[in-house]
Image (spheres, rainbow, N blue to C red):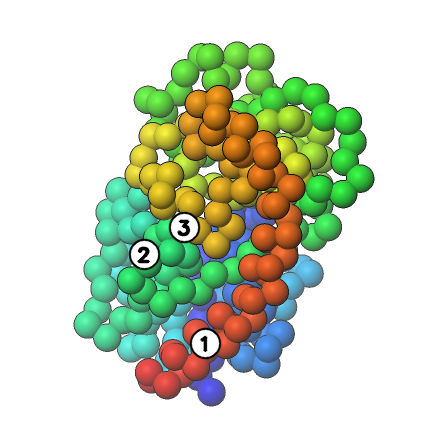
Amino acid sequence: MKPYVIVVPGYNHRSWGNRTLHLLCHLLNGMGVPAYLYLERYPATNPQWNTPLAEPAHIRDGIVIYPEVVLKNPLKSKRVVRWLLSRPGYITGKKFRAGSEDYIVAFSRMMDDTKPILNLQTPNEGLFHPHDLPPKQGELFYVGKGNPKARRPEYERGRIEVTRTWPATHPEYADLLRRSTAVYSYDTLTGVSYEAALCGTLAIIIPNGPYTREDIAKGELGLNGIAWGTDPEEIERARRTLPEAWPQYLNVLARQHEGIQAFVEATQNRW
């Protein structure tokens, strides 16, 4: 079996895409499929996950997986997978150049419903869930990848800002979500919205592109507990569906093993 080499920056617990790439390596190894990381920029891994580092032979003989933010083929692999964790160009402003033999797979139907899907749910490590919630009070806002021009004082006044670096640890971040009543997000596609909903906290997306309500609704987790915009009826719908977010997450999580197996079969047979 050809090994997989996943190109990714060092581990960052607050980056949903980063965690997803590291997680794929861990899950593949757990299934007995050899997988390795090729780390860019800084050499951090999750010590709780099985994510060994690639050696030259793995790169030479293996299947290289690039996220869509990698524009070319820096490892000069003959077997390239492009994994669309977001729409090409959304984060970098530039689209990758795919080779004629590249295999392109999407993280979700939200990115591209014409491509094969490899959807993973990052483990919540017992942190993001609706059980034994503390008393809720206060609201949050998050900018993330959202367009700065979309920011409005009325969505931020009296609310605490969550950033990529604060709260500093995952447990502190989860505790803040579990104690809050709502989070307003300028980032139309972010793990913050889903993690909030898992904690019984209303998530309100401020539309500013490139994703639409229809895009988010057809995602694997849907719009349970997530409002698209601030229309009172939409917020009430999201509030009413908050209890459905956790069981939907568990259903998707239970099926992800099948998706990984299908991905392995498709790529091993391709090369």
> At 35% across and 52% down in the image, what residue appears?
111
**What amino acid is found at the position of numbered circle 3 in the picture?**
Lys
Residue 23 lies left or right of residue 230; in this view the side is right
Residue 252 in picture, x, y percent from top left = 56, 59
Q: Which sits earlier in the primary sequence, circle 1 or circle 2?
A: 2
In this rendering, the answer to whether 188 lies above or below 77 is above
Q: Residues within 10 Å of mark 2 (few under 14, many from 20)?
A: some
The tag earlier along the polypeptide, 2 or 3, is 2
Is residue 121 toward the left or the right of residue 133 in the image?
left
Question: Closer to the observer: label 2 or label 3?
Answer: 3
Q: Residues within 10 Å of mark 3 (few under 14, many from 20)?
A: some
Does residue 155 sit above or below 134 in this rendering? above
Residue 188: percent from the left, percent from the top?
41, 37
Discs 1, 2 touching: Cβ within 8 Å: no
Identify which residue, 43 or 49, lies in the foreground. Answer: 49
The three-letter code of the residue at mark 2 reads Asp
Towards the viewer: 218 or 170: 218
Q: Is residue 142 above or below residue 68?
A: above
Disc assigned to residue 262 = 1
Residue 218: image tag: 3
Residue sitting at x 59%, y 77%: 31
Give me the C-alpha separation between circle 2 and circle 3: 11 Å
* Residue at 59% over, 53% down: 249
Judged from the image, the secondary structure of the residue bearing numbered disc 2 is loop
Asked which quadrant contains residue 63, the reply is: bottom left
Give me the residue at 37% from left, 51% from top. 110
Measured in 3D between alpha carbons, the distance from the residue under mark 1 to the one under mark 3, in whole angstroms, is 21 Å
**x then y, percent, for residue 175:** 71, 35
**Residue neighbourhood size for the residue with mark 1, other residues' Cα within 10 Å, grouped as few (<14), some (14–19), many (≥20):** some
Q: Which mark is residue 112?
A: 2
